[in-house]
Image (spheres, rainbow, N blue to C red):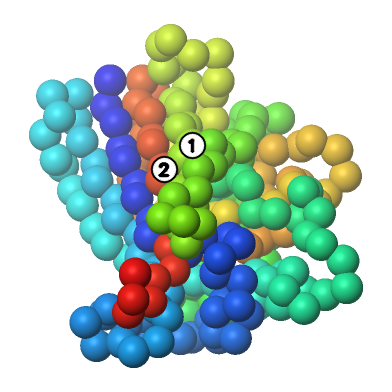
Amino acid sequence: MNTTKTGMALTGFAAVFTLLALTPASATFLNTDNADTPVLFGMAELTHKNVDGDILASSTVHNRLVNGGEVHLINGVFGATAVATDDKPTLICISDKLAVNKVVGEILETSIASDFTPETAFATTGTNTCVAADIETANGGSSAVMNATFYGSGATGTDEINILEDQMIESIAICDTSAAGTDRTNCATAGALFSAVPVRQTEVGASDSVEVTYTFNLTSPTN
């Protein structure tokens, strides 16, 4: 079975609220060696392997916290009510769409959930291209790790199918479940877009699986 692993370093949902609420989507990501204030890490690493475990391709890209995600974080920090469970970004979604600024090759900060709705050929009607992530916190609450696995149409050992054979993943979206019901067909049917990451084009074979790890991490010079 071919396996594609995508790792994204971003920042923990609870501990990072204050920093993100005051950090614009265009913020520069700093090296901790040169920072004297808390640092927000934002990057995505994708490693595509064949059935023998050989690396076919790898790439590293930055995350984009979209405007909707910024508003959500500000409301979570300074709003009068606590963030509802359905408003937390708990889904990882895959897509063949790439809403980007073509000049610099970055996700647009004005992107919304529907910008990442896959074409009909990407998955059959009713197929979940979004998966509820397993989420763990670490480092005293300063980081959170989201994990989800997506399966091709002929993958064995699972009843889950998330993408049809030979379709291309071009982006990953982190979304909430604020929409009515429990539809996980895509980010727009599930809820709102929190952040998105463009990835190297990854063609998924029928028996392939795609493992995605999204790490949200906040650090300061003293930790």
Q: Write the residue at 56% across / 65% down.
A: 15
Place residue 197 in its image quadrant.
Answer: bottom left
Q: Write the residue at 27% across / 78% down.
A: 32
Secondary element type, mark 2:
strand
| Residue 201 on image: x %, y % | 34, 52
Identify the image quadrant of the C terminus. bottom left
| Residue 219 on image: x %, y % | 39, 71
Is residue 167 among what the camera can see? yes
Front residue of 27 and 104: 27
Q: In this view, does 84 lie above or below 77?
A: above
Place residue 43 in its image quadrant.
Answer: bottom left
Is residue 10 among what the camera can see? no
Q: Give the mark, 2 or 1, whose residue is nearer the N terminus.
A: 1
From the image, tell me which residue sits under label 1: 148
Q: Write the residue at 15% across / 29% down.
A: 53
Q: How crowded is mark 1: few (under 14 residues within 10 Å), some or many (20 or more)?
A: some
Q: In the image as oriented, which residue stretches furthest toward the top? A: 157
Q: Do the residues labelled 2 and 1 touch (CB within 8 Å)?
A: yes
| Residue 167 on image: x %, y % | 43, 38
Q: How crowded is mark 2: few (under 14 residues within 10 Å), some or many (20 or more)?
A: many
Q: Write the residue at 88% across / 73% down.
A: 80
Q: In this view, does 79 lie above or below 152?
A: below
Amino acid carrying label 2: it is: Val
| Residue 184 on image: x %, y % | 69, 38
From the image, tell me which residue sits under label 2: 212
The mark tally for this picture is 2
Amino acid carrying label 1: it is: Ala
Front residue of 39 and 170: 39
